[in-house]
């Protein structure tokens, strides 16, 4: 639990740096979706952020490999289904766990608080449905 | 300069996710699995992140402008519409089903496990066919 809180503090500091220097919200789905607009003046910081995430992944793989997920290929269909919903839902709802969950709630945004409550609620239902379908409940 | 900052923010964010266990599907699903063995780690991450950022956000906002830009690019809407709620619901369903949201998904994509699994899967198919 202490690791989780410290990791969270690091996330909080990183999004604060983004705001202090660049004046931007660190919402990952929004940053990725913004790349798709291919706006020349806007694309480089977005791409650099994604590269930073990827580079961080390589560092984790090198120095803390047990932190990375093991995805089994048996669930490829499930991941495609989940990925489509995550992509479509975050663009429609203007944000995900980072943009609404961390940045928005810290701003005390009503939209973000409501969004976070909603996606956690449906996330809970989804896990229950996932387990029920497999007879794991 | 803005590009370098964005890279550093991405890097620190990824390390925060990895350190807190959020790059593991089991951690995320464990938080949402309130009927099973509940794992509060995701709540700890949110408490840590929001705790720090809610304080720093208000201090930074008081400056008036960011260091490298002429203004803050912050969302201004505060209306609640159907798109917000339907989008969040769809995202939540996908998030719970796969246990992956956009940040950890990008960070863990570099782990290569998925690629190895695909290769193993293809090999298994080939062996089964022959």
Image: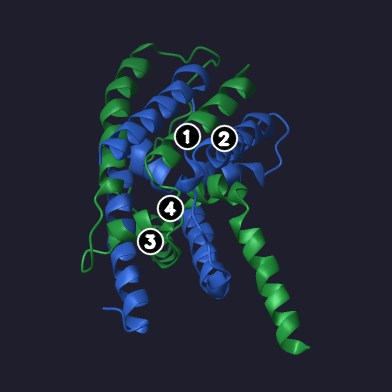
Dots 1 and 2 on the same chain: no
Q: Secondary structure at mark 3?
A: helix
Q: Secondary structure at mark 2?
A: helix
Chain letter for the blue part:
A
Q: Position of residue A86 (x, y in %)?
A: 49, 59
Residue identifier under label 2: A59
Q: Is residue B8 left or right of residue B85?
A: right
Between marks 3 and 1, how big is the CA–CA gap? Answer: 24 Å
Dots 4 and 1 on the same chain: yes
Rendered hue of chain B is green
Q: Secondary structure at mark 4?
A: loop
Do the numbered discs 2 and 3 sit on residues whose CB atoms are within 8 Å? no
Residue identifier under label 4: B24
**Closer mark to the observer between disc 1 and disc 2:** 2
Between marks 4 and 2, how big is the CA–CA gap? Answer: 16 Å
Q: Chain of mark 1?
A: B
Mark 1, Cα crowd under 10 Å, few <14 / some 14-19 / many 20+, is many
């Amino acid at each position: 639990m202490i690791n989780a809180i410290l990791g969270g503090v690091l996330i909080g500091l990183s999004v604060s740096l983004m705001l202090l220097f660049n004046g931007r919200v660190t919402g990952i789905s929004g940053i990725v979706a913004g790349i798709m607009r291919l706006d020349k003046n806007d694309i480089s910081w977005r791409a650099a952020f994604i590269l930073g995430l990827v580079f961080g992944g390589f560092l984790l793989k090198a120095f803390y490999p047990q932190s990375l997920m093991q995805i089994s290929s048996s669930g490829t269909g499930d991941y495609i289904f989940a990925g489509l919903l995550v992509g479509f839902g975050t663009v429609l709802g203007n944000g995900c766990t980072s943009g609404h969950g961390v940045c928005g709630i810290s701003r005390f945004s009503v939209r973000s608080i409501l969004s976070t409550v909603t996606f956690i609620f449906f996330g809970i239902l989804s896990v229950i449905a996932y387990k029920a379908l497999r007879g794991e409940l | 300069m803005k590009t370098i900052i964005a890279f550093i923010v991405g890097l620190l964010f990824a390390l925060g996710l990895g350190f807190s266990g959020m790059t593991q599907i089991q951690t995320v699903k464990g938080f949402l699995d309130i009927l099973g063995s509940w794992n509060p780690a995701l709540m700890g991450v949110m408490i840590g992140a929001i705790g720090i950022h809610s304080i720093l956000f208000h201090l930074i906002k008081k400056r008036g402008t960011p260091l490298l830009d002429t203004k803050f690019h912050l969302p201004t809407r505060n209306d609640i519409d159907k798109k917000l709620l339907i989008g969040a619901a769809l995202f939540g369903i996908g998030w719970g089903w796969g246990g992956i949201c956009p940040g950890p998904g990008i960070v863990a994509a570099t782990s290569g496990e998925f690629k190895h699994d695909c290769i193993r899967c293809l090999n298994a198919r080939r062996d089964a066919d022959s």
